[in-house]
Amino acid sequence: MKTVGIIGGGQLGRMLAIAAARLNLRTVILEPQADCPAAQTATRQIVGAYDDEVALDALAAACDIVTYEFENVPVAAATRLARSLPVYPPPKALEVAQDRVTEKRFLNACGLETARFHAVDSLAELSAGLADFGGRGVLKTRRLGYDGKGQHVFTGRDNKEETVYAALGAVPLILESFISFEREISIIAARSSDGTVVCFDPAENVHRQGILHTSTVPARIDPALGAKAGAAARAILEALDYVGVIGVEFFVTAEGGLSVNEIAPRVHNSGHWTEAACVVSQFEQHMRAVAGLPLGDASRHSDCIMHNLIGEEIDSVPEWLATPRTLVHLYGKADARPGRKMGHVTTLR
């Protein structure tokens, strides 16, 4: 029986541990917070910081393989672990995903379209970038931003560049051009160590305040565009020599084209629908890939819509439980803070 280490103890680690148990895999969580959501379903937890060398060595000693549930794992930690056991996805995927400028350059090198962008390391570079984009664009921190955090939208009216630059902490930034898009989609794909790639169907996503609100399958796109999204995911996976599940987010432009927004080298919120509408979920697919097991069939048996439960929306659970053909999945979190993901529900159609 193999043991899989999971760096990170949030809801994604929790769901990975559940999927692992169904495959007769043990899981060990590395997470500084004791009794984290993932520890409630895993075999064991090592309480320690992600860059704690003693904790990392203990994880390596306890496991056959290591994976992670979020992309802000220190690259140095993943590299240290990779010296003694397989780490999937590979540390290179973290290097690419952790810096938005590096990520955009990587995607462009794969022949994939993205928003135009400028690296911003000074107020003067911000001003020059805005001038290039007609005063409009999205300014983001290059590292550590998620769910709409660390961002500012310039609309071209009273931009207050100096104030915004100071508010974001004068850290390395990226200014991205606006893209005229009709909808946002994402695709969840998996690659095994033998190079096999399997893609789930694209989901159409709606965000509120920078946080994913719903994912609907099928997405309202032409099948040819869905195939193009799958080909883009395959190109990314192969360029990284990737093993595991990846989430790739796209903008569908008004002209019917695709622009890659970002990649997430892990299981992804917009793939939660797979546990209700597919025989093999994204979580099981990831565990199959990292453990060297055959990938499963990613076809869906039902159309569906997944809703995130954010903050006090957790109070609506009784109504969701009474909704026919609905899977309710809660994350074991005690405090329903604003903007916090507390669970999700998926209704089959």
Image (cartoon, rainbow, N blue to C red):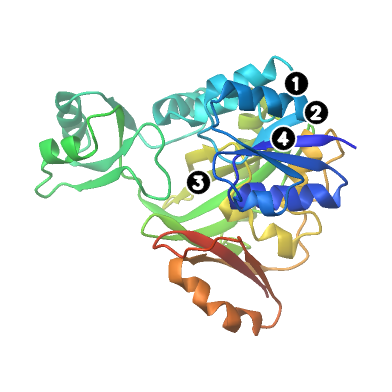
Residue 4, percent from left and from top: 76, 36
Front residue (pair 155, 331): 331
Q: In the image, what residue type sits under mark 1? A: Leu
The mark that comes first in sequence, 4 or 3, is 4
- For the residues marked 4 and 3, what is the alpha-carbon distance in whole angstroms? 30 Å
Q: Mark 1 or mark 4, which has the lower sequence index?
A: 4
**Proximity of marks 2 and 3: CB atoms separated by less than 8 Å:** no
Residue 151 makes an appearance in the image: yes
The residue tagged 3 is: 250
The CA distance from mark 1 to mark 4 is 10 Å
The kind of residue on which mark 2 rests is Asp
Q: Residue at x 73, y 64 (%)?
A: 277
- Residues at marks 1 and 3, CA–CA distance in whole angstroms: 33 Å
The residue depicted at 66 percent of the width and 21 percent of the height is: 81
Residue at image mark 2: 64
For label 2, count other residues whose C-alpha is less than 10 Å away and answer few (under 14), some (14-19) or many (20+). some
Disc 2 or 4, which lies upstream in sequence? 4
Quarter the N terminus occupies: top right
